[in-house]
Amino acid sequence: MIRVAVMGAAGYLGGELLRLLLGHPGVEIGQALSTRFPGRRIDTVHPNLRAQTDLAFRAPDDLADCDVLFTATPHRTTMTLLPRVRERAGTVIDLSGDFRLPDPEVYERYYGVPHAAPELLGSFVPGVPELFRDELATADLISVPGCMATAAILALRPLAGLVAPDVQIDARTGSSGSGALAGDGNLHAERSGAMRVFAPVRHRHEAEVSRLTGLRARMTATGVEAVRGVQVVCHATGDADEKAVRRAYREHYADEPFVRIVAHRRGTHRLPDPKLLSGSNYCDVGFAADGGRITAIAALDNLVKGGAGAAVQCLNVRTGQPEPLGLGFPGLHPI
Amino acid sequence: MIRVAVMGAAGYLGGELLRLLLGHPGVEIGQALSTRFPGRRIDTVHPNLRAQTDLAFRAPDDLADCDVLFTATPHRTTMTLLPRVRERAGTVIDLSGDFRLPDPEVYERYYGVPHAAPELLGSFVPGVPELFRDELATADLISVPGCMATAAILALRPLAGLVAPDVQIDARTGSSGSGALAGDGNLHAERSGAMRVFAPVRHRHEAEVSRLTGLRARMTATGVEAVRGVQVVCHATGDADEKAVRRAYREHYADEPFVRIVAHRRGTHRLPDPKLLSGSNYCDVGFAADGGRITAIAALDNLVKGGAGAAVQCLNVRTGQPEPLGLGFPGLHPI
Amino acid sequence: MIRVAVMGAAGYLGGELLRLLLGHPGVEIGQALSTRFPGRRIDTVHPNLRAQTDLAFRAPDDLADCDVLFTATPHRTTMTLLPRVRERAGTVIDLSGDFRLPDPEVYERYYGVPHAAPELLGSFVPGVPELFRDELATADLISVPGCMATAAILALRPLAGLVAPDVQIDARTGSSGSGALAGDGNLHAERSGAMRVFAPVRHRHEAEVSRLTGLRARMTATGVEAVRGVQVVCHATGDADEKAVRRAYREHYADEPFVRIVAHRRGTHRLPDPKLLSGSNYCDVGFAADGGRITAIAALDNLVKGGAGAAVQCLNVRTGQPEPLGLGFPGLHPI
Amino acid sequence: MIRVAVMGAAGYLGGELLRLLLGHPGVEIGQALSTRFPGRRIDTVHPNLRAQTDLAFRAPDDLADCDVLFTATPHRTTMTLLPRVRERAGTVIDLSGDFRLPDPEVYERYYGVPHAAPELLGSFVPGVPELFRDELATADLISVPGCMATAAILALRPLAGLVAPDVQIDARTGSSGSGALAGDGNLHAERSGAMRVFAPVRHRHEAEVSRLTGLRARMTATGVEAVRGVQVVCHATGDADEKAVRRAYREHYADEPFVRIVAHRRGTHRLPDPKLLSGSNYCDVGFAADGGRITAIAALDNLVKGGAGAAVQCLNVRTGQPEPLGLGFPGLHPI
């Protein structure tokens, strides 16, 4: 039994980690750590866990040794925290933005502050089993990409040789991506029904996409009406026709347990839509081609395949368990 | 030209007052007062007013004389504020909860604190033109009822002689009713898609309904997915059949400019639904009767007929202008 | 391995049965029957089942023998169909409205047509394990109550001795309850954001509630903005205080695997809200008492505990498997 | 008083025309024509018009002479209808797709059928007052562009000289754009919360945008959760910095009554969001520039500035009335 701990356990990604880990037959959640709610039962903060557990939060300083530590703490916080807690865990799987970019200068350009632990940056393996399965099997430091980055990486990776390097990514996201802390922009009356372009240029996830696909990615991001869910629509140029594009996707993903190709000619659900993926670890990918233009689409649940689910998938790879273990929920329809 | 001022102008009711008053041909908005944003243009807080006005907020202490002052400030605040500002205005129209209940003991029971200006309580006329049109024509102090109270009062008033006095009101409301300040419960990811019973018993608006209908009203309230909109479903007992009930509603509301009877046998929109009323000053009322049970239903936009629109309607009555002036927007379909 | 068949497998309840049964370790889905889509893969209609199965629909006439047959066909259809298919299955679990009311006269009053198989009406055991666990263990004909009826029965049953017999139920429901067939009232632009009182008096589920609780239930029903989810708010009178009420609920539900008591003094999620239950088999129940009035609240997912999940729970009871088998998904937060 | 008629008056665009025209002081709606509902009151189909009018639909064949005829009939229908009705009206303002593209070959490529009235194609003036005000003042045949096309044209036109000709448009739309007829894809349970890429490549509005901006536009379109509202995010390349871009927008739109520049550095509502524009005739435009990439954004209500409102604005220009007449509703906040 793998002993795991979750830091930042009161946030939305933390809660999703707890949900997945409580249903995982190969792990034991020893510790759920939270700065805000030490001593409180976790189901008072995550009401979907009622009757699932009696676990309570403890203070972060009380972190005891464990096999795997998940850090679901905010970026900027995580880079100062991580060097202090690293010794407590055999493997650290980080879900924050702080260890995704190996170059401290790129970090500073996109995050606006100097990196506090640049010496660690090069040691992290990206938490994308589809690309780094072998490295993850032995990695002690794993950094799960941003939710929109994961979607875009999986959408674009099969196109790497088929399209020109300049790619425009149009990302849409639900409100859970901005976290569990209330603010003016997150107020229901303001956020409800919105189409809010919050990053008209240079969303920070574009740096991760560029790095892991070899393309020059530009990303625009919009908040749309949803709680969970991310969708990316990637605009690329290239002469490949739809048949060739389909072949490329099949080659990449035929054996992947959590990537499905969804690209039908007709029907209501012919291309990836995140609403079908709430709670599931799938990333659905699809595409269309027309006259030199290729559109690639991906959808996922930002808290699962875009965060906690990917982290659990990495844990499975790292600890030699079956990769889909604990990640079997297929999603709902209708929803 | 009537010179009006709005205190609490940065809130949602304040913003709705500004929208209605800017479109009103008989008034001039001299002052929009806000504690939080003095000096800022009002369209930075109420973006729907872009290109409608160059007005800026000023600090509440700078209130100058005016003909009509609207107080859209929070309850508890208003009862200490009002005695200080009363001299500045010929007529005060209050939208808070502080002057709705004439009895200070009832106030304390429902609001949990003693009233700070009990000597004023008896002087307010309820802002319900359908019941108090004559009194409102000369009133200097007007108190607009709560949004759910207005809906319930208009739904139940025609039934007063037809039903037993014990009435159960089931109220549903959108999120704008809880105001423009962010909090844990208002976070989009929490509030979205909710059916949240926030007052399982004894919602405070029941006291107003009992007072103005002569019934013994009990009110339960639930937040449902909507930004604007209130609906009440009132459960009463009585032997009247639907024909007699319809007659009672017609007698009460045939000549009312802002109450429509919506009670059809079939069709998608056969009973009152607040989604059709966003932005409009209508209160739609409907009913059904079956075997000794009478159900009365009302719907309105909580920020318009449930607040700012009712207040403007009162202003029109008080100042001798046509009652519908500035309140002509009929609502949208589809929406 | 129990061999099961699902008739009406292309509908929303049918799809939910397929989802649950595919994840159930003790059953084998041999047959998914559909009048509309024979020959098509089931994942073309239920896209959440992509990569879960290669099963295709077959025509209802091709029904072969099985251990358990679920009928998720429309009411009126089911009562003519059932006598013809009964021989094919050891046990039939019906999810339609046709076999819920033992008295054909009551059926006709609520459904508007004479019953086509009155001789079978008395043989069905209600699919409510919380009330009929022993009978279900040997039943060959099981009828799952309506979604709103199940919620109201579980909310009210503990109050049976504590309240006066007249009870008013206010039910709210999402759009999936009206099925997968498009109609004017279901069009997104019409149904979105609605508060639509579609049964102002005498919703047909009230007959089931009266029967199984011994109370005289009246039910009003409203469609609110949600796809999944039912909530009932039940208004009763009685002198019991909250402590006595809580005790009654605890006595009834302390050992129930799928009923949780949710009745907290404060917090965003202090009372049952169906949004937390999407995909889960829980029915959450809560309450409040004040001055002679008792409010009881229940929430569930209409397609799970209000239909397919309850049916699977009954299958588990009937076939001697652990009652929670295949029903472990706890729901999501946030959502 | 201008005598107007609306053909296709039972659809969503038809209903919006009726709402706007009923509130317009310079016109008289003589006729509302509908194939589906002749004889029915228009407020039974458009419930927001209750108490606004007693008008009833009449059959299209009963069309009598009028000054201005609005055709809000489906594409393909309109091109066969229009030659027959043209004589009845001094001016025809068409809201369908049939007369937007002057070249019948381009029409056939995008609409999949040969044009039925190619001889008329060259006679229509595009219903975009911002570009064709002078021509519209005397036009007898006016064709209002598609909702997404209008948004993209207004977003991109100021950039014409500043960016490279290849432009990628990412359009998002609410459900009302697909009309008032129920279908599988429009069912609430399917459409709710969707992010549905329904045109991954070559949305037909791209042809209109290319024609009226001189750019080579590609358009992808996605349905998102909303009833009303269109947003376009246009991705272009060019060296202009934000200051130069702002200057271009100001030059184009400083005097336009219905185009607002919304491009702030911060704030919740810093860029165009259609939720603020429901019911209003504004098109909000915004932009950002970064390292050779320019993002242009526009938002509007597809039924108003994207259809009926633009048509009324054209009527005002054509008949010499003040351009904003009848179009004063500013939109709501919050909503």
Image (cartoon, coloured by chain):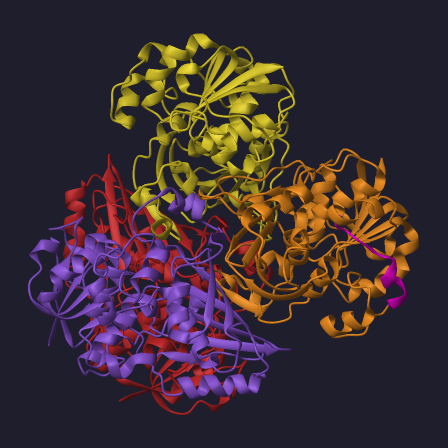
Chain colours: A orange, B red, C yellow, D purple
Per the image, is A124 magenta?
yes
Expressed as whole percent of the image width and height from the top left, the position of residue D258 reads 35, 78
Q: Nearer the viewer, residue D98 or C335?
A: D98
Residue C130 image position (x, y, % from top left) = 54, 24
Q: Is residue D163 visible?
A: yes
For the view shown, which residue lies furthest in the top direction?
C87
Q: Is residue D249 above or below residue A191?
A: below
Q: Is residue A65 left or right of residue A246?
A: right
Q: Please, is residue D270 above or below residue B210 in the view?
A: below
Quadrant (top left, top right, bottom left, bottom right) of the N terminus of chain A: top right
Residues drawn in magenta = A117-128
Between C74 and C198, the residue placed more toward the observer is C74
Q: Is residue C145 above or below residue A167?
A: above
Magenta stretch containing residue A63, yes or no?
no
Task: Identify the residue at horizontal 12%, vertical 61% (top origin).
Answer: D85
Q: Residue D188, position in %: x, y? A: 40, 46
Does residue A41 appear left or right of residue B184 in this picture? Answer: right
Residue C159 at x, y = what percent? 49, 32
Residue A290 lies, with reference to residue D275, above or below; the image says: above
Q: Count numbered badges in the picture.
A: 0
Q: Pick the residue in front: A122 or A223.
A: A122
Question: Is residue B146 visible from the viewing direction of this image?
Answer: no
Residue placed most toward the observer, B126 or D262: D262
